[in-house]
């Protein structure tokens, strides 16, 4: 969430939905929906991007607003919302200085949004700002993940991320990605190359670098992040289920309640 606007721009923003395709059956959609039903509305969707969860929940009649710091991602979200007949409230702000006019019953941090806060000490400030934007009894829930394990390579080769035809003009869009990790400082970094081919000619190329991309947490560290901000009744779940996280869960969700 504190990544600069330039990190989610251009072909990255324009092809975000093309890459992800149909996300309606993703398990986090149902998990977060259960949390909303338990803790209530209104809801704030952190890092709402192009509206994957926000627009889906609006279609269910949920009072949900969106927050992101990337203007081009928010522009795509607004266009999609308008086509669907919605006019969502969308905020472009950074978490560290978050100042919204509402307080929420549920705040969602999907897609490891809290891990994108990478500066030392910054995550603690951001989680406290989220705490302040909750009503008493409201909940913050977010996912945490990282696939690298000791003994695995610290750097990957370029790998094809996707190659898909763009519906509006039939252009072939390709993206490649590579990643490198710094376990000593608990950070990972990525680069992505984009290429658009139309009628046999490459008409656009872009290189995007996110360095660092994110910070990874152990379950204990993520729990302490919530506790330090004042959250109580903290639970850690395995992936997007309501089962307790296992010791080796590489994907887990943390939920905390504002007293």
Image: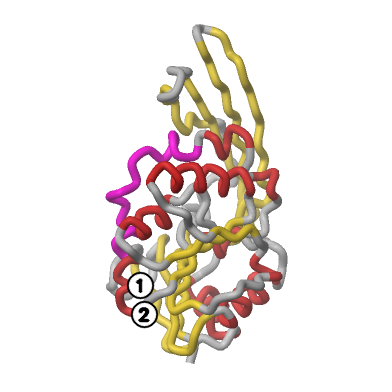
**Mark 2 Cα shell of 10 Å, populated few (<14), some (14-19), many (≥20):** some
Residue bounds of the magenta highlight: 16-31
Would residue 18 be counted in the magenta stretch?
A: yes
Disc number for residue 39:
2
**Near-viewer residue (206 or 84):** 84
Q: Residue at left 43%, top 88%?
A: 137
Q: Which of the 4 image quadrants contains residue 252?
A: bottom left
Residue 80 position, x and y percent, is 45, 43
Q: Quadrant of the N terminus?
A: bottom right
Q: Which of the 4 image quadrants contains residue 120?
A: bottom right
Q: Residue at left 63%, top 35%?
A: 10
**Near-viewer residue (69 or 100):** 100
SS at mark 1 in the image: helix
**206, above or below 171, in the image:** below
**58, above or below 96, in the image:** above
Would residue 54 be counted in the magenta stretch?
A: no
**203, above or below 239, in the image:** above
List the single residue furthest toward the top: 200
Q: Are marks 2 and 1 in contact (CB under 8 Å)?
A: yes
Drawn side of residue 101 relative to residue 135, left or right: right
**23, above or below 131, in the image:** above
Pointer 1 residue: 36
SS at mark 2 in the image: helix
Q: Residue at left 70%, top 44%?
A: 6
Q: Could you tell me what secondary structure mostly forms the magenta stretch?
A: helix
What's the distance in space between the residues labelled 2 and 1, CA to CA? 5 Å
**Mark 1 Cα shell of 10 Å, populated few (<14), some (14-19), many (≥20):** many
Q: Residue at left 47%, top 54%?
A: 87
List the single residue furthest toward the bottom: 259
Residue 104 position, x and y percent, is 48, 77
């Amino acid at each position: 969430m504190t990544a600069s606007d330039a990190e989610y721009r251009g072909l990255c923003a324009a092809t975000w939905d093309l890459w992800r395709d149909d996300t309606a059956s993703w398990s986090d959609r149902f998990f977060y929906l259960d949390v909303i039903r338990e803790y209530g509305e209104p809801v704030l969707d952190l890092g709402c991007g192009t509206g994957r969860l926000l627009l889906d929940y609006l279609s269910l009649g949920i009072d949900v607003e969106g927050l992101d710091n990337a203007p081009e991602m928010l522009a795509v979200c607004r266009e999609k919302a308008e086509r669907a007949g919605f006019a969502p409230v969308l905020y472009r702000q950074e978490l560290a200085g978050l100042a919204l006019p509402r307080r929420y019953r549920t705040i969602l941090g999907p897609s490891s949004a809290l891990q994108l806060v990478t500066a030392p000490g910054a995550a603690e400030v951001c989680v406290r700002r989220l705490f302040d934007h909750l009503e008493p009894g409201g909940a913050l829930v977010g996912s945490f993940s990282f696939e690298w394990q000791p003994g695995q390579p610290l750097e990957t080769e370029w790998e094809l991320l996707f190659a898909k035809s763009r519906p509006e003009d039939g252009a072939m869009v390709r993206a490649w990605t590579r990643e490198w990790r710094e376990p000593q400082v608990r950070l990972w970094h990525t680069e992505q190359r984009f290429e658009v081919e139309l009628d046999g000619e490459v008409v656009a190329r872009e290189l995007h670098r996110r360095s660092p991309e994110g910070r990874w947490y152990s379950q204990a560290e993520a729990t302490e992040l919530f506790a330090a901000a004042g959250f109580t009744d903290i639970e850690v779940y395995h992936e997007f289920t309501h089962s307790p996280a296992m010791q080796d869960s590489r994907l887990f969700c943390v939920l905390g309640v504002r007293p």
